[in-house]
Image (spheres, coloured by chain):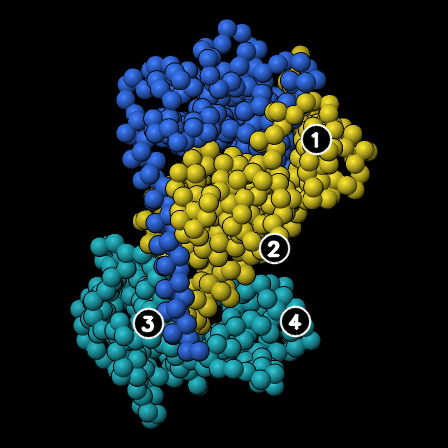
Chain colours: A cyan, B yellow, C blue
Amino acid sequence: MKNSAALRVVGQDTASEITAAVEINDFHVWFDEAPVLRGISLALQKHRINCIIGPSGSGKSTLIRSLNRMNDDVEGYSFKGSIHFDGEPILRKSVNVATLRTDIGMVFQKPCVFPKSIAENVLFGVQYVKKLSRQERLHLVEANLKAVSLWKEVSHRLHDRAGSLSIGQQQRLCIARTLAVKPKVILLDEPTSSLDPVSTRAIEDLMLELRQEYTIVFVTHNIQQAQRVADQLVFMCNGGVIEQGPKQKLFGNPENEQTRKYLNEEYCDC
Amino acid sequence: MSASARIGKGYVVASTFISAAVIVVITGFLVINSWDAIRQSGLELFTSEWNPPKQKFGILAMVYGSVVVTVISLALALPLGLATAIFTSEMLPARFRLYVKSLLELLAGIPSIIYGLIGIVFLSTWVEHAFDLQSGRTVLTGGLLLAVMVLPTIITLWDDALHNVPRKYRETARGLGLYNFEVIRDAVLPLARTDVIGAALLGLGRVLGETMAVMLVIGSIDKIPGSVFNVLVPGQTMTSKLGREIAETAVGSLHFSAMIFMGLILLLFVLSLTIVALTYFYNPEQRLYE
Amino acid sequence: MNRSLLNKLFVFTTVTAAGICCAVLLFMMAVITAKGLRALDFEFLFTASRDFGAAGGIFYQIVGSLLLVVFAALICFPLALGTAIFKSEYLKNGHMQRLCAVLVYGLNGVPSVIFGVFGLIFFVNVLGTRISWFVGSIILAIMILPTVVLAAFHSINSIPQSYRESASALGLGKWQVIVKVLLPQGIAGSITGLFLGLARAVGETAPIMFIATAFSGVGIPGSFFEPVTALPTHILALTHQAINQQALQNAWGASLVLISLVTIFSTLGLWSRMKLKTMSLR
């Protein structure tokens, strides 16, 4: 873990302005006293796909679930360290968690739609943020379904149950629902792991589009997928960051032997 | 088929037949025995005067008593129980849950006669002092006691109903920036809806059918008060009437038959509640979530 | 209104409600334990009652209650097990399954006093058995039948299909599969259900008070068709003399003993679930 303490911001494209959206500083997590994250320091970059990769049990999910404080509700959770979002500390008790989660949205591993209509599902989160007129509701449904390229497929049956969609469509609906609350950061926790290759491709294309407007943090254990979509890559192992940097560097010229082995799908004892 | 297999099959068929027939036999006997009353008194059974010496057997006063007692107890127990179930299922840390659940199961198992004992020793005295009455054995006392009695059952059933809703719905809703009360109101409760209503119906059936506790605290006067909203007077429910009088009634008399008729009305009502609960609500196949 | 404020209000409401419930329920427990312990001693448990229960102990009431539920268990268990096996292994027609469920669940919802009334009509009057503890056992057995049937059904029905298939593949007939494979595994759940049913039966008053019990002057019955005296009906008799402090104290003592019996049966039920389950997995 020799690089884990170093906080480095290296852009792949130095011409555009690059800033960190989320900064994590010496962040530790324990579940029931057992350490899960051991001193993570990271900067996640604005308008980039920040891809976190690593074997199962390396703490990837725990890390991104900490970014919008989903772990607060997990029994036995405790932490040390700090996380800043747009310069504001988010781990303080005084932070309004509900508001934080509208800024940092999350898409889970398995699509989870409510037993309501497709349109109601899109509006499920946003309707609490402000009162919506009928016009606004229609507009929001259309705009967000278009943003995930689902509009063409479902525009004629917006009042059907969301459960009637295919799993891949459901996952895109979940993303649309997250987009509707207008987050600045979207966390995706292995969003394609339960999908078929075609649906996976659709989600990947979608992510590449979304990075124009959003900061994306994306967890996967699939190395090819990381190669296809990532801008920035973070390699995690055993609760720590082994190496981080632009994708090309980690794939082409990694500093760490473990990183090289893992990304080449060789045996790596971490 | 070997001999033992044949005997075995005969045994399971016979026991199933007996188990299924019991309820039919019970209903049948009540119908047969209430036939005299139905034939002789007819619609007069649905009047409010119960006076055996005059051969007047109107059961309305008892029906009224059962309804009022039930309304009072559910009006208290349902909101209190729901809020408590939300607390135990959604807010209480998991390590306390086992203890709370065991305590609730223990309380749900306390025999109703003991609730009755507590009712006459404590509750009726309190009601007597609080409202400055001559006797604390009133319809209100019955309702309050039943509320306490049905609470543990309804809390555990509701706690299970809420707890069975998969975690992912809560996480998704929280992830979208909902406050806890919005998560519970708009994500958890709608998903648990069928179980929640089913449990409430079972609670309703239990309250309606409860005998001993009510019988001891309600005062046993077969009258509808001048104002139907006056609950501070003694009353009578269908169950308390049966419990108090049936053993002292001559079998074969019109009086007996009218009592059985009342039992039949009660049984049919509770049975239809059970069937509705079963068909529409308390049915695992109708879960709204996988 | 402000969402954050509403949320606080909501949390406050549920915590208050839970507090109220907790207070009420703990009060009940405290009263029963405190009042009951004062009445409880060796003599109370092992002597007969005198003066219509106002003096003496509750020995015959304990014996009577146990007698009632032991025979209820003996009557109920074979019947419930047979029904559960048929429901799980033979009954495949959807309509029949639904009908069976409605009948069994329907029985579960029948108010307890109705069982008493039915027993009075059917056994005491039609069959002319007079007041008898054995009739009480039959009625209690009927009352707990749904609980036991459902528990047995669930434990037999949840045995994976592969067990049945691999046993049939070894050449066992259907009944042999049931006896050799399903019963040993399903029995734990059935026994759990039986104990839970008994926990309920032992505390019931209404089903037995017209047909099985007498309030005083009864010892251990010499035949099947004699009345006994039982704890719940004894408490009922004592509440009628609630002005007499000694009678009231005895009522509390009897209540505590009754609750202990209920608790013992439920605990046995849960214990058998854990114990027998691990045995069948071995």
Dots 4, 3 in contact, CB < 8 A: no
Residue highlighted by disc 3? A67
3D distance between C-alphas at marks 1 and 3: 80 Å
Residue highlighted by disc 1? B53
| Amino acid type at image mark 4 | His
Residue highlighted by disc 4? A159
What residue lies at 56% left-to-right and 38% top-to-bottom? B220
| The N terminus of chain B: image quadrant | top right
Q: Chain of mark 3?
A: A
Please state which of residues B190 and B228 is positioned toward the viewer in this rendering. B228
Q: Nearer the viewer, mark 1 or mark 2?
A: 1
Q: Chain of mark 2?
A: B
Q: Is residue B125 left or right of residue C104?
A: left
| Amino acid type at image mark 2 | Ser
> Callout 3: 10 Å neighbours few (<14), some, many (20+)?
many
| Vertical arrangement, residue C17 with respect to residue A159, above or below | above
Q: Secondary structure at mark 3?
A: helix
Q: Secondary structure at mark 2?
A: loop
Q: Chain of mark 4?
A: A
**Residue A251 appears anywhere in the view:** no
| Amino acid type at image mark 1 | Pro
Q: Which mark is residue B227?
A: 2
| Amino acid type at image mark 3 | Leu
Q: Nearer the viewer, mark 1 or mark 3?
A: 1
Image position, residue B47 (x, y; %): 73, 44
Dots 1, 2 in contact, CB < 8 A: no
Q: Chain of mark 1?
A: B
Image position, residue A42 (x, y; %): 26, 75
Q: Are marks 1 and 4 on the same chain?
A: no
